[in-house]
Amino acid sequence: MKALIPAAGLGTRFLPATKAVPKEMLMVVDRPAIQYVVEEGLASGADEVVLINSRSKKVIEEHFAPNPALVEELRARGKAAYADEVERVGNLPVSYVYQGEALGLGHAVLQAAGKTGDEPFFVLLGDVLVPDNAMLPAMKAVSDAHGGASVIAVIPVPDEEVSRFGIIDGAEVSEGVWKVSGLVEKPALEDAPTHLAVFGRYLLSPRVMELLADVRPGVGGEIQLTDALEAVLAGEEMYALVVDPADGFDTGTVESWLATNNELCRRAGIC
Ligand code: G1P
């Protein structure tokens, strides 16, 4: 099973910091933000992470590539702990596909179709970090309890945030687990069926990948993953797991990135 991580964005909100350094490589405490997301994907039991990258962000690939010269140098200097960590990161099972144009999240995910085959797959959006790595296993348990159905993580959001997210419709079938009957991407408040927002962690059936190939541009002129999820409901069940927003640490804006650095630094006992 693969874990897909879209990483081809321009990082516009972080300019000029992201002019030469991809946003994914900005540091959160002691490592690039993307490393948390890759490690979360692997902690879920996925055998490989597929990063959906842009050709201009090769430095992300360098981060996850082996660097034997650096490891050797660190060992020669007696810095074994750093050498071990550099070696470990360079050996994580990460592969790459490319999104040539920014045509939307659904389009990004579709670029990995050749990797996922006929297996279910995870999608992790990197703007929110989940450092305890517990969310994907919880979603997998819900999927297993419902015959391998797709499961998406959702959080309750207030009125003023509804139009920033994908929003689900459905009914609660057990505590914190909803059977999804519809999804709508970034609805106006009056059109939102619930206040449960798609959080950015998905466990999806291979049918979603098939349907993505036929999704036409939707909200914002982009090919939306949410529209493929809505389409899959015609033939398959889907569930949503209500997760605790406090388990996620946002890095999507300069302010939230700084706050996440402060909080995770405090928790690590460094600051
Ligand atoms: C994407 C999804 C949306 C989801 C959100 C979570 O939107 O399209 O359904 O609620 O991520 O962060 P984006 O934030 O990329 O506009």
Image (cartoon, rainbow, N blue to C red):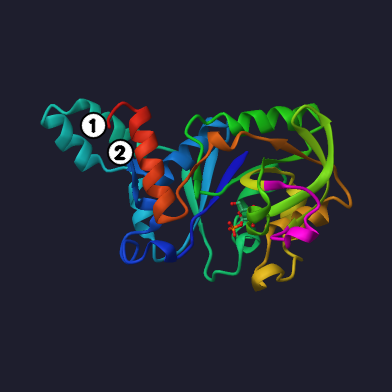
**Which quadrant of the structure image shows residue 225?**
bottom right
Observer-nearest residue: 46 or 237? 237
Q: Provide the secondary structure element on which disc 1 rests.
A: helix
Point out residue 241 in the picture as x, y percentages from the top left corner: 71, 35
Point out residue 178 in the picture as x, y percentages from the top left corner: 80, 37
Quadrant of the rendered image holding ligand 1? bottom right
Answer with left or right where residue 117 lies relative to residue 177: left
Q: Residue at x 32, y 59 (%)?
A: 21
Is residue 182 magenta-colored? no
> Taking the image as drawn, is residue 93 in sight?
no
Residue picked out by circle 2: 30
Give the residue type at disc 2.
Asp
Point out residue 184 in the picture as x, y percentages from the top left corner: 76, 57
Answer with left or right where residue 69 lies relative to residue 226: left
> Taking the image as drawn, is residue 195 in sight?
yes
Q: Residue at x 23, y 31 (%)?
A: 82
Observer-nearest residue: 216 or 186? 186
Q: Residues within 10 Å of mark 2 (few under 14, many from 20)?
A: few
Image quadrant where one finds the N terminus? top right
The extreme left residue here reads 77
Q: Residues within 10 Å of mark 1 (few under 14, many from 20)?
A: some
Give the residue type at disc 1.
Tyr
Magenta residues span 185-197
- Residue 106, placed above or below residue 89: below
Disc 2: residue Cβ within 8 A of ligand 1's nearest atom: no
Q: Residue at x 52, y 69 (%)?
A: 100
The extreme right residue here reads 234
Residue picked out by circle 1: 82
Q: Which callout, 2 or 1, points at the residue further toward the start of the chain?
A: 2
**Which quadrant of the structure image shows residue 189?**
bottom right
Observer-nearest residue: 52 or 174? 174
